[in-house]
């Protein structure tokens, strides 16, 4: 490891063979010493899951030309924890997660393995960003996303960052001529309305597929959903202190004598 | 379903046979029409994971004397989504998750299936609480925890609640004579320092068990960790809008020309 170069940890949730993580490595590989530690299979929707009941496998692979890379049998969060403890033996300078195939704006952040990996790094005090493209196709065009990833990484490697910097970056699916640049936003209030698809298996037993419809309940003009709609990349700073201080105040006034 | 009684959805992450969920049902069963929808196996550490690549099973069981109950093959979040769409066909009045065998204070909230189930309900606009006992033993004494659960449920069923009320409630492991009551707190900044246990399997291949040491970095007197240490039940109101507005301000000043 070249001590003069910053160490950049790269992970994702689509798995180590996904085109998105290859695009990310390609976008930043000259900016530091890159170490990739990614799941050996797709882990979308894993949220902040960790593997505690079964052991983990970790194998060195040659998936990226000349770049140190490892695949792990666990979740994206497991990858970050293993990278820190068993591979790097130190904090990386920054952590980048993605480029995810599919949106992680608004409430999707909560379900996203891509963002949870970045959050795990931020908890450790490593400036981190999760990057996601709204184009979920396996043959997505990552031209704009790569430029965004590089620009974000350069910013994060410059100067002092807040101790727990964590960015949720989503890139719109637009032609380059229609692309507007990056915009700082807040998380939109949106949710999924599920409508499980009920089927009967060949043995006569019921089973269900989760299908959902994304509903944006937020009419604000400063949200990530709105920025993406207008052709911007949305950048939302995210925190892992989930205390709701406004409700805390309401409870202090309303729920007196909490016994 | 008796239309006059409030509907209380109960779930957990330790699985439908865990003593903690039985204690919870027992504590609140006279307060409304109870419907239990819980995982058919332990799902600790699943965070906000959802099942998207495989279908889900959902079976009616008779696990609680006279109480409608269902087991699901998915995660705690899946249970809430399935309960809403396929069992209740409406919003329950409140959702209670737990009683978890083990702490979910501070950063543990992020990894917790118990809290993620409650958060999923809160996203839907259902006032929710996740309850966890610091006694992780299977034969834990839930006497205090049951009183807390009942008190919280009664509060939540009274009057108007904030639209997305979500409480992270942790109960200390103390004798009743040393118990201090409930305290409103904020989430402590704490983390896990992992130290993976490296072993070699009978075929000569490496594998790793995740083991960790909990480290509280927060010296504040208003945190959940501190309240529990003093013998209080900690009550932290939690939100799912993770926008970090303080870093947003810093970025507006520092990261000019975001392109």
Image (cartoon, coloured by chain):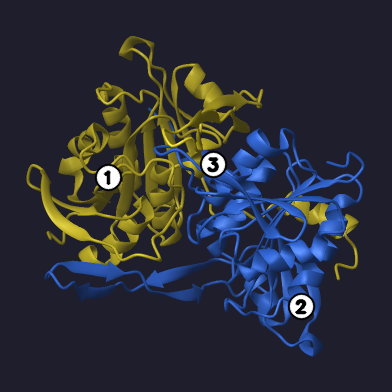
Chain colours: A blue, B yellow
Chain on which label 1 sits: B
Gap between marks 2 and 3 measured at Cα = 45 Å
- Report whether residue A244 is seen: no
Q: Secondary structure at mark 3?
A: helix
User: Tags 1 and 2 in contact by the CB under 8 Å rule?
Assistant: no
Please rate how many residues cluster around mark 2, counting C-alpha atoms within 10 Å: few if below 14, some from 14 to 19, many from 20: few
> Quick check: A12 above or below B184?
below
Chain containing mark 2: A
Other residues around mark 3 within 10 Å, as few (<14) / some (14–19) / many (≥20): many
Q: Label 1 to label 2, Cα distance in Å?
A: 44 Å
Q: Nearer the viewer, mark 1 or mark 2?
A: 2
**Residue that carries the numbered disc 3 in the rendered image:** A248
Residue at 59%, 71% in the rendered image = A101
Same-subunit check for callouts 2 and 3: yes
- Secondary structure of the residue carrying tag 1 is loop
Of badges 1 and 3, nearer the viewer stands 1
Q: Residue at x 32, y 50 (%)?
A: B95
Q: Percent position (x, y) of residue B41? A: 27, 45
- The disc at residue B41 is 1
Q: Which comes sooner in the sequence, label 2 or label 3?
A: 2
Task: Give the letter of the chain under mark 3.
Answer: A
Residue at screen point 65% across, 68% down = A20
Q: Residue furthest top?
A: B177
Q: Secondary structure at mark 2?
A: helix
Give the numbered dot on residue B241: none
Q: Which residue is mark 2?
A: A143
Q: Residue B209 or B164: which is nearer the viewer?
A: B209
């Amino acid at each position: 490891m070249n001590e003069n170069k910053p160490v950049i940890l790269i992970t994702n949730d689509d798995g180590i063979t996904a085109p998105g993580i290859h695009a990310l490595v390609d976008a930043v590989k000259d900016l530091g010493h890159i170490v990739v530690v990614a799941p050996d299979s797709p882990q979308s929707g894993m949220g902040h899951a960790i593997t505690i009941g079964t052991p983990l496998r970790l194998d060195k692979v040659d998936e990226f030309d000349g770049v140190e890379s490892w695949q792990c049998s666990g979740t994206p969060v497991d990858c970050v924890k293993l990278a820190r403890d068993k591979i790097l033996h130190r904090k990386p300078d920054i952590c980048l997660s993605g480029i995810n195939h599919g949106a992680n704006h608004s409430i999707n952040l909560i379900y996203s393995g891509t963002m949870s990996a970045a959050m795990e790094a931020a908890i450790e005090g490593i400036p981190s960003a999760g990057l996601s493209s709204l184009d979920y196709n396996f043959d997505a065009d990552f031209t704009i996303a790569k430029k965004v990833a590089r620009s974000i990484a350069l910013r994060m490697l410059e100067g002092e960052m807040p101790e727990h910097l964590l960015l949720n970056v989503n890139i719109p699916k637009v032609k380059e001529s229609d692309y507007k640049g990056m915009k700082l936003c807040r998380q939109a209030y949106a949710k999924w309305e599920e409508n499980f698809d009920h089927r009967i298996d060949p043995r006569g037993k019921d089973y269900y597929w989760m299908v959902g419809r994304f509903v944006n309940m937020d009419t604000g003009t400063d949200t990530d959903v709105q920025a993406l709609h207008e052709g911007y990349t949305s950048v939302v700073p995210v925190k892992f202190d989930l205390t709701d201080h406004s409700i805390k105040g309401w409870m202090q006034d309303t729920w007196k004598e909490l016994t």
